[in-house]
Amino acid sequence: MRLLPLTAVIALVVLPGSAAAAAGTSAAAAAVPAAVAASASAGAQGFTITDPRIKESSGLAASRIHPGVYWTHNDSDDGPYVYAVDSATGKTVARVTLAGIGTPRDVEAISLGPDGQLYVGDIGDNLNGSWDHVWIYRFPEPKELADVTVKAEQFTVRYADGARNAEALMVHPVTGRVYIASKSEDKGGLYEGPEQLSASGTNVFRRVADLPWVTDGAFSPDGGRLTLRGYFFARTYPWKDGRPEGEGERVDAPWQGQAESVTYSADGSTLLFGSEGESSRVVAVPVKPASGSSAAPSPGKPGATPASGAPGPAGEQGGGGFTKGAAVLAVGAALVYGAKRLLRRRPRGDS
């Protein structure tokens, strides 16, 4: 995660709120553990990442061959490592070292393809277009969980309309096509990769849709839905003809100060939302039926409500249902964290 754009900070500060609402912020925070327990009962469970090496978890992907295991990685300043975390304990059960690639610059996302391979997106760009290319790494998901070194493929990526910053990479679980969502204060975009990635040439990604400010995304296991999250929102879109359809439906995502990751559980019944920070919490939110279902109302539709005791729904981009107290907390945390990251980080050269 990076320092919030000035317009986002201003939007937070001017959000309406009363003293009574602000006073309720601490009570809502105290209810989070209960919300996590309630949501976990409907599917995959939330968990806390306990490995002290994982300080900037910036992506999540559910394993298909190891039940309850989630793959994650640090944002940067770590190395060519991917970690397998057991959701039952929060402990790391494997660390994979990627060989055959250069030095990672800004790893932001991870996704599992239908070919059984993990795709790691070294796609961040702190200077918003300073690097004319980024990379994707790919390697088979290990069949056994143990610390291991694997040879990974490295793919060079350029965007058809110029360099940009991105934090979300999604592999479609049916077609295997790779998509990247750029992160822009004005208007982000969804970029579609070629039908097959090439390790010998440059892979040009082309813009196919406009998106809000996105920090991660994930396809449902059947490929029928795409869920995107930002700092202050999460929405699920029907996926039709290789594109997200309509305005999407709001997801009752948790408030997380360093909101960086989202994935579906392997069975598709639950969304898992993660964040950066030491001992970071991954929160489980049951997936609600799509529009038109005869079951419970879909997220964002009238009558949809969060789990009992859950934090309120994340607001839409540029505004939302935050109290004044929560807004002040968010601004303070973002400024302090962003300042620290900017002071200790310098652009790195290509490998």
Image (cartoon, grey):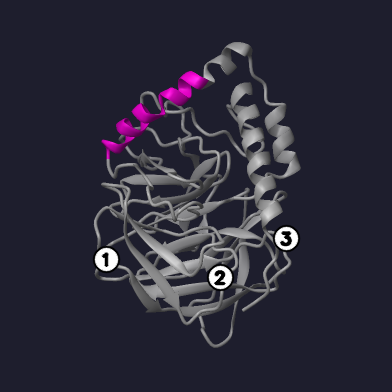
Residue at 63% of width from left, 58% of height from top? 189
Does the CB distance between marks 1 and 3 fall below 8 Å?
no
What's drawn in magenta, residue-wise? 26-42
212 and 107: which one is in front?
Answer: 107
The spot of residue 109 in percent (x, y) is: 50, 60
Against 302, residue 213 (above or below) is below
Residue 196 visible in the picture: no
Magenta highlight on residue 33 = yes
The span from disc 1 to disc 3 (Cα, nearest Å) is 36 Å
Label 3 sits on residue: 127
| The furthest residue to the bottom | 200
Residue at 42% of width from left, 64% of height from top? 82
The spot of residue 121 in percent (x, y) is: 52, 66
Q: Secondary structure at mark 2?
A: loop
Label 1 sits on residue: 145
213 and 126: which one is in front?
Answer: 126
Q: Secondary structure at mark 3?
A: loop
Against 97, residue 182 (above or below) is above
